[in-house]
Image: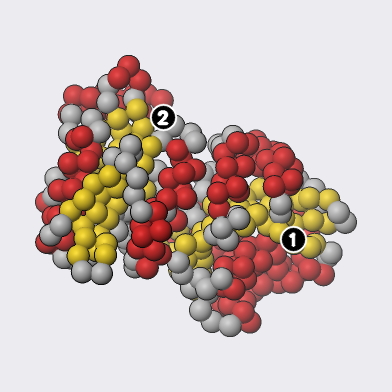
Amino acid sequence: MPQRIFTPSETIDAAAWDGFVRAAPGGHVLQTTTWAQLKSRFGWEAGYALVEGEGGIQAGAQVLFRALPLGLGRVAYVPKGPLLNWANGTVADALLNALHRLCRRQRAIFLKIEPDEEDNPALAQRLQGWGFRPSPQTVQPRRTILVDLTPEPEEILARMKSKTRYNVRLAKRKGVTVREGTERDLDSFYELMTATAKRDRFGVHSRAYYEAAYQLFVPRGTGRLLLAEYDGELIAGVMVFACGDKAWYMYGASSDAHRNRMPNYLLQWAAMQWAKTRGCRTYDLWGVPDEDEETLEAHFLQRRDGLWGVYRFKRGFGGRVVRYVGAWDYVYRPALYWLYCRTLAWRG
């Protein structure tokens, strides 16, 4: 099957690639050229491996490359990809051959893939047969909650836990309003992000990162900054993204003030309505603890470490808990890969 590769110094047809991503069953915002543009401002470069056929691209991967210190080579990473029918061995072989050619040309010490595929023993077995190994480093959340946006709004609300549905309506009754944020609001949103990170002990990107995300996605209609206010005071905000028929909640923040007014519940409902209006069928709440649902339900009232606190919040929106197949590495230079993994473990 015809294969093509594009190194970071070569230009791909962005419209054709993004059209393929939007239409692909596993298409994801992290595989769009807009995401590559975002990452390119912070040390990454994008290349592409394609399998083409009648009608255009049949399978492909957007690969992000980042140079390692001391000229030791590069890391190659495919976030939420490759995009293909994994059961079609002929197509998979062709795409993986193209991927390996691209990565070796870019002096990658290893290739990390993180397919947007639900946990599947058959796929895991195939990946091992192709020479991949389970990665010690998973970048994207291994488990998440997906909300079905296909019913009418009242039905979506009815599927929520009663307390969550109550809090959505309570926020309205208590005077919380939600509006679309503008670029002028980014300073205030970032202040909220840093305050939330300090309170809940998680890392945040730089202000420049959120500004770039806004500038690249919001004008295109594939992102939105939503802000919750009370009496003119900003008390919470979210940044959400969309691609094809899917939407993702990735960044959120809230003030310590007026938490009793439940602004975060109304914000998520507003984000779901925005996603549904633009044709999305699924809303991804983006990350919960990597435990089976029985364990999650048994312990969410007691646990507060890691993502346990957000699971208590997210579970109420009536979605389905999903576990992905995770991250897999293909090693080109074993000694440097060993050193890379040891460094990660030391830093961790």
The quadrant where residue 112 appears = top left
* Dot 1 crowding, Cα within 10 Å, few <14, some 14–19, many 20+: few
Q: Is residue 343 positioned above or below 110 on the image?
A: above
Frontmost residue, 343 versus 105:
105
Return the x and y of residue 10 as percentages of the image width and height.
Answer: 32, 41
| Left or right of 287 in this view: 157 | right
Few, some or many residues within 10 Å of mark 2 (<14, 14–19, 20+): few
The C terminus is located in which quarter? top left
Nearer to the camera, 53 or 317? 53
Percent from the top left, x then y, of residue 156? 58, 77
| Residue shown at 33% from the left, 37% from the top | 9
Indicate the secondary structure of the residue bearing disc 1: strand
Q: Is residue 251 above or below residue 276?
A: above
Image point (15%, 57%), residue name: 2
The image quadrant of residue 335 is top left
- Under mark 1, the amino acid is Arg
Which amino acid, mark 2?
Answer: Gly
Label 2 vs label 1, nearer the camera: 1
- Residue at the limit of the structure toward the top, as seen here: 70
Residue at the spot of label 1: 179
| Disc with the residue nearer the chain's start (2 vs 1) | 1
232 vs 7, left or right, is: right
Give SS at disc 2: loop
Query: Which residue position holds label 2?
Result: 348
Q: Quadrant of the N terminus?
A: bottom left
**Res. 166 in view:** yes
Color style of the picture: secondary structure
Q: Position of residue 90 (x, y in %)?
A: 11, 61
